[in-house]
Image (cartoon, rainbow, N blue to C red):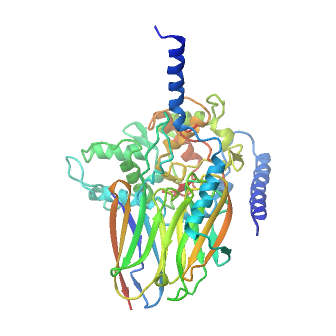
């Protein structure tokens, strides 16, 4: 098959996706959450070759971080002289699928909960947000939930945070005056600057992003999006980002954790 | 921190062609990037990977800046005898990492 | 007080300094010349035939920072008839060489996999050097797209 035919086939597939999405949009009222059965992980918007990198459990680009994460999990730290493994001998299967959640009255994500353990239980220094160590450890903990469905609390005490995150998702921001929903609800599957817009389900974080040539967190990805719409950015770990993370995890409820994912 | 990963089948039949996969943790800074103020970021890459099988060199690769960060190099070799495969990565700024993997050939 | 002439000299010097971060205007020609020269350095004056080599790459790349590449060469890989080396080059990168692997009969199969950086849409060529001194190649035209939503400082 020559190049033109290959690209033609690729375009046809993209067109089919668009048609399917258009048909679906016509059936939906505006502003409702994506229907559960037709939601797609970012994995499905990638090429076969990039998918293969995510599937490679031996020499995939995220593997080095997982190995580092495993070493940190086993390493004794802080005044307590305990490792994660010492207390969590049975592992933390299922934990990553439930975050963000409330911890001591504050909404925290998995990275922040890990640090709360480091400072509170291990009596060790917190790992800086976006440091290689925190990414590796978060990836290692997240990996233990791979394949499990996302399930976050959004009612009761979580409700106000959830609503705040939802408002952020639908609020126009930045000089380009775009809301997350406009790209990721209304135009998922279409192209932006040569890349396909995914539906923005945080199923695989922390991810190895080919663009970063390394691993990074969901909040780093948020910052890239806000830079994209030329908006004033929030800090990594900020309450605004954690609330948005809660909304996105609810939006992705039932979808399977893929951590650590590979994304373009 | 994990520097390298090598994947060698633990056992093979004599004469069988086996796949060897290697992964090294390295930014492979190309030397073509600039900071936001226009300063050139100097090159810092792995330049060579050598693999020996019971002391005999079976594979050598010269890597250039166009190899992605955290370089993956996969190749094949014939399982000739039991022993050890040794791997050595060398690069800029005195980078040097070794690893080894045993193989049992029946 | 600086004269107008002194001011112009200083200003010209200040303007010349940041030029190191700019690309020359004929960059495409320079890179094509470097690409041709890099291939000549490997094959010399010998002809490069097509066939035997298979360069496996995605035709449309998700991200140019990490493009999976597999090069396979048909060869019995015996002591008298084998692949001596496999070389990979790109046409549009700032520097054309990607990887050069030395094989031999002990390889069993002439195959090499790596992940390459491809800067821009263009040709990628794999050249195999055989034990009898002949060269074979395969080329692929790759389309590289730009990621959306990048970091500050990149836009």
Camera sees residue A154 = no
Instruction: Provide residue A103's location: percent of width, then percent of height.
Output: 39, 41
Task: Identify the residue at horizontal 46%, vertical 37% (top origin).
Answer: B39
Q: Which of A52/C56 is in front?
A: C56
Q: Quadrant of residue A49?
A: bottom right
Camera sees residue C140 = yes
Instruction: Provide residue C155's location: percent of width, then percent of height.
Output: 58, 37
Position of A56 with respect to A106 (left or right) is right
Task: Identify the residue at horizontal 44%, vertical 50% (top origin).
Answer: B43
Q: Quadrant of residue B54?
A: bottom left
Q: Which of C101/A34 is in front?
A: C101
Instruction: Provide residue B3's location: percent of width, then percent of height.
Output: 36, 60
Q: Quadrant of residue C97?
A: bottom right
Residue at the top extreme?
C1
From what the image shows, is residue C124 above or below residue A35? below
Instruction: Provide residue A4's location: percent of width, then percent of height.
Output: 78, 62
Task: Identify the residue at horizontal 46%, vertical 61% (top origin).
Answer: B71
Q: How many marks?
A: 0
Position of A48 with respect to A240 (left or right) is right
Position of A160 with respect to B47 (left or right) is right
From what the image shows, is residue A134 above or below residue C5? below
Q: Which of A204/A57 is in front?
A: A57
From what the image shows, is residue A175 above or below residue B22? above
């Amino acid at each position: 098959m020559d190049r033109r035919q290959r690209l033609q086939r690729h375009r046809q597939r993209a067109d089919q996706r668009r048609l399917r999405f258009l048909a679906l949009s016509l059936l939906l009222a505006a502003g409702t959450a994506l229907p559960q059965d037709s939601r797609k992980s970012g994995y499905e918007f990638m090429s076969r070759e990039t998918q293969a990198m995510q599937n490679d459990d031996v020499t995939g680009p995220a593997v080095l971080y997982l190995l580092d994460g495993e070493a940190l999990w086993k390493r004794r730290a802080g005044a307590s002289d305990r490792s994660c493994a010492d207390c969590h001998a049975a592992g933390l299967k299922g934990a990553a699928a439930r975050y963000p959640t409330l911890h001591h009255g504050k909404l925290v994500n998995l990275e922040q909960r890990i640090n709360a353990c480091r400072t509170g239980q291990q009596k060790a220094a917190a790992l800086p947000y976006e440091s290689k160590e925190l990414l590796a450890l978060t990836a290692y903990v997240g990996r233990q939930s791979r394949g499990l469905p996302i399930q976050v609390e959004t009612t009761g005490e979580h409700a106000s945070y959830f609503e705040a995150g939802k408002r952020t998702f639908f609020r126009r921001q930045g000089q380009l005056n775009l809301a997350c929903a406009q790209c990721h609800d209304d135009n998922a599957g279409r192209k932006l600057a040569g890349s396909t817009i995914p539906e923005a389900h945080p199923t695989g974080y922390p991810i190895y992003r080919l663009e970063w040539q390394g691993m990074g967190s969901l909040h780093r990805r948020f910052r890239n999006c806000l830079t994209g719409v030329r908006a004033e950015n929030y800090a990594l770990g900020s309450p605004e980002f954690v609330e948005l993370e809660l909304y996105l995890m609810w939006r992705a409820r039932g979808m399977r954790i893929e951590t650590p994912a590979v994304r373009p | 921190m994990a520097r390298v990963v090598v994947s060698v089948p633990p056992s093979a039949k004599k004469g069988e062609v086996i796949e060897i996969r290697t992964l090294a943790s390295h930014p492979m800074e190309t030397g073509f990037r600039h900071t936001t103020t226009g300063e050139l970021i100097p090159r810092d890459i792995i330049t060579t990977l050598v693999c020996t099988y019971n002391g005999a060199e079976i594979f050598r690769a010269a890597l250039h800046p166009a190899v992605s960060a955290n370089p993956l190099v996969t190749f094949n070799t014939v399982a000739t005898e039991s022993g050890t495969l040794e791997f050595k990565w060398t690069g800029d700024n005195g980078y040097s990492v070794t690893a080894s993997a045993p193989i049992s050939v029946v | 007080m600086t004269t107008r002439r002194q001011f112009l000299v200083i200003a010209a010097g200040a303007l010349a300094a940041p030029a190191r971060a700019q690309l020359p205007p004929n960059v495409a020609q320079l890179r094509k010349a470097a690409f041709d020269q890099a291939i000549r350095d490997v094959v010399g004056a010998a002809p490069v035939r097509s066939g035997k080599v298979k360069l496996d790459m995605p035709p449309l790349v998700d991200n140019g920072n990490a493009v999976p590449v597999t090069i396979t060469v048909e060869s019995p890989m015996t002591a008298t008839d084998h692949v001596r080396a496999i070389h990979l080059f790109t046409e549009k990168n700032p520097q054309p060489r990607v990887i050069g692997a030395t094989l031999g009969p002990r390889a069993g199969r002439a195959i090499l996999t790596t992940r390459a950086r491809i800067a821009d849409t263009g040709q990628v060529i794999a050249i195999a050097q055989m034990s009898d001194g002949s060269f074979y190649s395969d080329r692929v035209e790759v389309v590289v797209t730009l990621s959306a939503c990048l970091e500050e400082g990149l836009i």
